[in-house]
Structure formats: C-alpha cells, structure tokens
C-alpha cells in the first residue's frame, strides 16, 4: 500500500528539504518508486538539493490548476531508476488551489508510486494545510534550539488538527559538544518539550553541507554512519 509522508518544520533552516531529498533517495536506492513534491511556493529548493534545477519546466501549481498533465511535471532523477520530482512554483502563485486538489493529486500518484513525500513550507497556516492534504505520516524536522523546538511543537498541534495521525520528530544538526557543555538543549530536554516521538537524530557534519551544495543526496555514499543512521530513521517513520 502506498504511503504519503509530509516533511514539515516550525521554522526555516532546520534541514527540512535536506531530509526530504535524502529520504527519497534512500527509498529509491531500495528499489521503491518514489516521487517528491516541493510545496514551498516561491522558496523552492528541492530541485537544487537534487541537482535538477536546470530541468524544471512545469511545476506543481501547473498540475493542480490543470495547466499540464502530471506526467509533464514529473522530472526523473537520472541517478536512480525510480525517483521523480515535481517542483514548486518559483514565485508566489495566486491560482485558486484547495487542499482537495492536492489530496486528489496524491491519490493519483499513489496509483503509480510506493511513496509520495511532500516538502512543506516552514511554519503553519494555509501553506501547511495545503501540503498536509492526503498525508498519513509527518516528519517534523527541528534543531536542538529552544525556538525551533517550540515552533516544531506548534506544527505538531496544527497537524493533529488537520488529521495527520502519525507524527514524528527528527532532531537535525545535533552538536554533541555543545549539548555536553549545556550550551544548547539536550535530547532529553527536547523530548520533554514535545508530544511527538523522536524518530532519530542527525549529527551536524560538514559533509552534509558539501553534498547538499553539490546537489548530491549524502545517502548515496553507502556504508557511512550518516547513511546507516538515515536508514534507521526512515524505517521508524514508515514502519
């Protein structure tokens, strides 16, 4: 049975799009058919994280408004047999789109793909409501930072009201030294501040920034601690 996962965050800069790109790549490497949808209108970056920025012709708003067919907006990642992207609009789009439009799109994509992963805009409001339509699982990406944790909890409560039953937290950019010094909240402190279960943590690593800027999902380098950790997190989210 196909699954639709939303990737959200309370504030920008927590690594939401990085997580989306790598989760999609990891599942594609396992042989699943995966499509990533960028719903961050006007601030699209998922195409950059996948190194596909020069191949975008149609975007998700073109599909939702009926301007083009789904097949026309699907961009295949040439490094994988079964990973596709539908990019976001490069600017704010005023076309009249409702959550029902996206829910129907997800239902149609589920006929072809094993996993649909949606990269939501940061924060709450109409953008989150639209992106969450059709999702059965949500990964809320945060950092060990008081503002990010509080905002992640707000997103969790909003997703609950929107009917997304399975919601998990992933703590990104973890710096063990700063935690040991007490300079930033520890994992137990973050856990106590939220109602969501923690699916895992991702350590801060310069290799992640290098890979991201090159448009390369870091999980492509198999056998590393990052790839193994990402695999475990993904399993917990989608079990």
Image (cartoon, grey):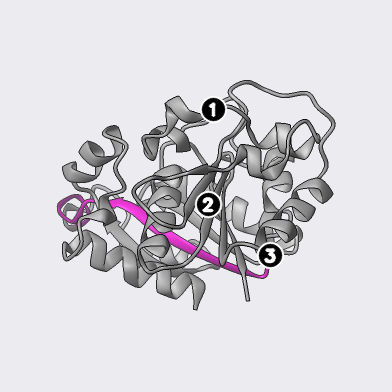
Tell which circle, 1 or 2, labels the residue nearer the N-terminal end.
Answer: 1
Mark in the foreground, 1 or 2: 1
Q: Is residue 138 left or right of residue 180?
A: right
Q: Is residue 233 left or right of residue 157?
A: left
Quadrant occupied by the N terminus: bottom right
Tell which circle, 2 or 3, labels the residue nearer the N-terminal end.
Answer: 3
Please state the horizontal and vertical placement of residue 147, each as a whole percent of the image: 46, 43
Q: Which residue is mark 2?
A: 152
Q: As displayed, is residue 76 above or below residue 1?
A: above
Please state the horizontal and vertical placement of residue 133, each as a whole percent of the image: 73, 54
Mark in the foreground, 1 or 3: 3
Q: CA distance from mark 1 to mark 2?
A: 20 Å
Tell which circle, 1 or 3, labels the residue nearer the N-terminal end.
Answer: 1
Q: Is the residue under label 2 in contact with that under label 1 (CB below 8 Å)?
A: no
Q: CA distance from mark 2 to mark 3?
A: 31 Å
Please state the horizontal and vertical placement of residue 161, each as a whole percent of the image: 75, 59
Residue at figure coordinates x 63%, y 62% from the top left? 112
Q: Is the residue under label 3 in contact with that under label 2 (CB below 8 Å)?
A: no
From the viewer's side, name the closer residue of 69 and 191: 69
Q: Is residue 51 left or right of residue 166?
A: left
Which label belongs to residue 35?
none
Residue at figure coordinates x 47%, y 67% from the top left? 32
Q: Which residue is mark 3?
A: 111
Question: How many residues crowd around disc 2 within 10 Å: few (fewer than 14), some, or many (20 or more)?
Answer: many
Q: Which residue is mark 1?
A: 43
Q: CA distance from mark 1 to mark 3?
A: 29 Å
From the viewer's side, name the closer residue of 26 and 195: 26
Q: As displayed, is residue 46 above or below residue 175?
A: above
User: Quarter-wise, where is residue 157 in the image?
Assistant: bottom right
User: Does the segment drawn in magenta span residue 5?
Assistant: no
First to last magenta residue range: 164-179
Please state the horizontal and vertical placement of residue 62, each as a whole percent of the image: 72, 32
């Amino acid at each position: 049975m196909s699954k639709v996962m939303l990737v959200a965050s309370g504030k920008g800069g927590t690594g939401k799009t990085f997580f989306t790109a790598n989760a999609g790549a990891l599942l594609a490497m396992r042989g699943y058919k995966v499509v990533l949808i960028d719903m961050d209108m006007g601030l699209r970056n998922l195409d950059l994280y996948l190194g596909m920025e020069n191949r975008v012709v149609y975007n998700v708003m073109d599909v939702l408004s009926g301007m083009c067919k789904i097949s026309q907006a699907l961009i295949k990642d040439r490094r994988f047999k079964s990973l596709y992207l539908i990019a976001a609009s490069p600017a704010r789009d005023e076309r009249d789109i409702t959550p029902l439009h996206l829910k129907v799109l997800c239902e149609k994509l589920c006929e072809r793909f094993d996993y649909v992963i949606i990269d939501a805009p940061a924060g709450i409001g109409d953008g989150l409501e639209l992106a969450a339509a059709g999702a059965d699982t949500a990964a809320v990406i945060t950092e060990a930072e008081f503002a990010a944790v509080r905002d992640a909890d707000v997103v969790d409560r909003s997703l609950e009201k929107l009917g997304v039953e399975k919601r998990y937290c992933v703590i990104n950019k973890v710096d063990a030294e700063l935690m040991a010094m007490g300079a930033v909240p520890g994992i137990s402190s973050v856990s106590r501040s939220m109602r969501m279960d923690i699916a895992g943590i991702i350590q801060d690593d310069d290799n992640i920034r290098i890979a991201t800027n090159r448009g390369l999902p870091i999980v492509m380098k198999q056998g590393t601690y990052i790839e193994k950790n990402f695999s475990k997190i993904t399993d917990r989210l989608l079990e």
